[in-house]
Amino acid sequence: MKKFVVKSTALLLAAGFAATAYSAESLQDVMKRRNLSQQDLLAASKTYVPTGKRDEFVAFSSGGQSGQQGNIDGKEINWGDTHHPAISETQGKYDGQFLFINDKANPRLAVIDLRDFETKQIVVNPIFKSEHGGAFVTPNTEYVIEAAQYASPLENKKFYPLEEFNEKYRGGVTYWKFDRKEGRINPKESFSLELPPYSQDLSDAGKGPSDGWSFTNSFCSERYVGGIEKGRPPYEAGCSAKDTDYLHVINWKKAAELVAAGKAKKINGHNVLMMETAIKEGILFLVPEPKSPHGVDVTPDGKFLTVAGKLDTHVSVYSFEKIQAAIKAGKFESKDPYGIPVIGMKDALHTQVQLGLGPLHTQYDSKPCIAYTSLYVDSQVVKWNHCEGKVLDKISVHYNIGHLMTMEGDSADPKGRYLVALNKLAIDRFVPVGPLHPQNHQLIDISNDKMQLLYDMPVPLGEPHYVVAIEAAKLKPGVRYKVGTDSRTDKAHPGATKAGEEETVKKGNKITVYGTLIRSHITPETIEAEVGDEITIHLTNLERAQDETHGFTVSTYNTHASVEPGKTVTVKFKADKEGVYPYYCTEFCSALHLEMQGYLLVKPKGWKPGKVVAAKAVYTETDYKATVKKVVDTQVVIDSVVGYITSVNFKDFPDVVNMVDDATDQLNKIKDAKAKHEAAAAKKDWDQANLWAEQVWQYQVKAADIGLRAKTYLEQNGAKKVK
Ligand code: CUK
Ligand code: CUA
């Protein structure tokens, strides 16, 4: 420890000397040197978060096409194409409890618990082969909506030729029932509605007056089937031939009742309400919408829905009231080929507003009637008034914006303030990194009449289609798990192990390790196996201190776990190759992190040890005495830290209490190690004596490390002296 102090002082001195060679720059100097304008400075002061301060909003971004893991139909899936995250809602407002996200390529939906930001569940859609209109939640998160995209037969693994597209291929929308208490989707109580093969696109749930209804777009009501290799015009021509496509208007509350009343058909074991039933029961309607629509976004008051048509310069604002009036009056202009009643566009429209080229997605402001729409082709964001139908402002973005996102801007209670443009192309914005450019987000201030571009942010990896942002104060994540928790089930882990109860059990060719992790030690330090053994390692992180995560990996066995404080994880693998495989902690958790190691020894079958030569002594009595002196000196430091902590009201700080508990645990281990080094010294076994004395010092160092952290925390958080 002393060595560190000396070193860092030397560094400080060096830095100090260097600094004297220059005088500190003023704000003006920096502006001049970096060629910054007043406008840049204003933008910087609006976005800079000083050290120790925190962001007001947190964004959750989809990862687009990127890697992860899973399993569908017994096939390992190593990537996904996530598009739309959704935060759970209570009465239409973000509640910060759960996040849902869809996978377009492998139709499925993930549930993420925002207490620990972990994926708790992935449900695979039982009837779709691709999807896009998810995840969208109903106002109290009763259901998570997931609509199909490319039509396919609903039965699993069933082939029908493309010639039977109109008869056998289907779209649909799934309503996944969410059990908030369990924090999981309940597939048994979930259901789908069969829809025509129109290539359904985005969805949204009604709220307020439109609660109980949901809306799903479609972009290929032509039901076109391409096949350019057979001389047919391509999909993009056939799917945009007509002037309109269809908005699906669905009464999901009634649909749920019909399913409960047994009116659904089972397909692949899943409840599907067939179109025929939906038409007969009056819960499914269509409204024409202009050319190749993309987003449908319900206004915060639930009275209107904005549809943006990629190939139309307008957005169309539909009135929920008018749609309902047409339904009540039975006023339909026609039926589609499947018999679904079609409401006339005129009878449903509130207004249409010309915005520009390629409108895609819409978000709302905290100010009433104010909406923002992305223009893909024009590379612009338009601010407009959806009540009065007029354009208010436009700003250029760089380049080709897809989604846009305002703070809680798809909820019943948008927060305004900022807008993020999720641009598809970055082109010249950032330092070049080769042909694959980073993704590009731009932050825009929307608190004034004119929008102001504040910041360009490169984003690595997959393309974030949609992002949701929530007030940071609404998130209440935990700091640690109750010791022995399986974070996937949120229940006690069967392999949870307490300190001192670690063991390795071998039964036949199955080895089960009940191990623990605590700075800076993995128990056990050796795992012995024979080739072919199946190894299961349960590891419990015993730390109570905040942020003391350990990791675990075994060399070349393709296994890894991140073990946060309190968590128990299991890694499993087959020891299928003979050899020596170090395992270690993968998080730099302590000064002796590198020493947090062990060996997996995989012996050939039937291996017997040969004659072991006794090792020569390494340490002397002098070494032992020096170590004992080091222990005595360190104890002085510990005593002074303990003196400080107990002199203030540390018990009022739960985080400190946890740190003190951890430190005390370390100190309690000293007694045993001390007895061992004293016994060895009495026998003049200086190797054993010195090493056990060193171990005492290790416990001290860890305790002192935690103690100093607690002391700093108390000093920074205004601890008060107690008598
Ligand atoms: S989609 Cu990508 S820009 Cu999947 Cu919401 Cu519109
Ligand atoms: Cu534990 Cu590094």
Image: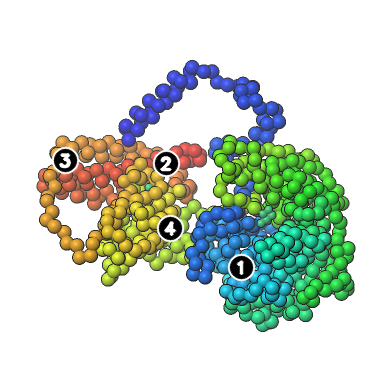
Q: Amino acid at mark 2?
A: Arg
CA gap, disc 2 to disc 1? Answer: 53 Å
Instruction: Mark 2 and mark 1 in contact? Answer it, CB < 8 Å.
Output: no
Give the residue drawn at x 62%, y 41%.
Answer: 457
**Residue 158 or 210: which is nearer the viewer?**
158
- Helix, strand or loop under label 2: helix
Residue bearing the label numbered 3: 619
CA gap, disc 4 to disc 3? Answer: 39 Å
Nearest to N terminus: mark 4 or mark 2: 4
CA gap, disc 4 to disc 2? Answer: 22 Å
* Numbered tag placed on residue 129 in the rendering: 1
* Closer to viewer: mark 3 or mark 2: 3
Nearest to N terminus: mark 3 or mark 2: 3
- Helix, strand or loop under label 4: loop
* Numbered tag placed on residue 709 in the rendering: 2
Quarter holding ligand 1: bottom right
Q: Amino acid at mark 3?
A: Tyr
Q: Look at the picture and state if 578 lies above or below 507.
A: above
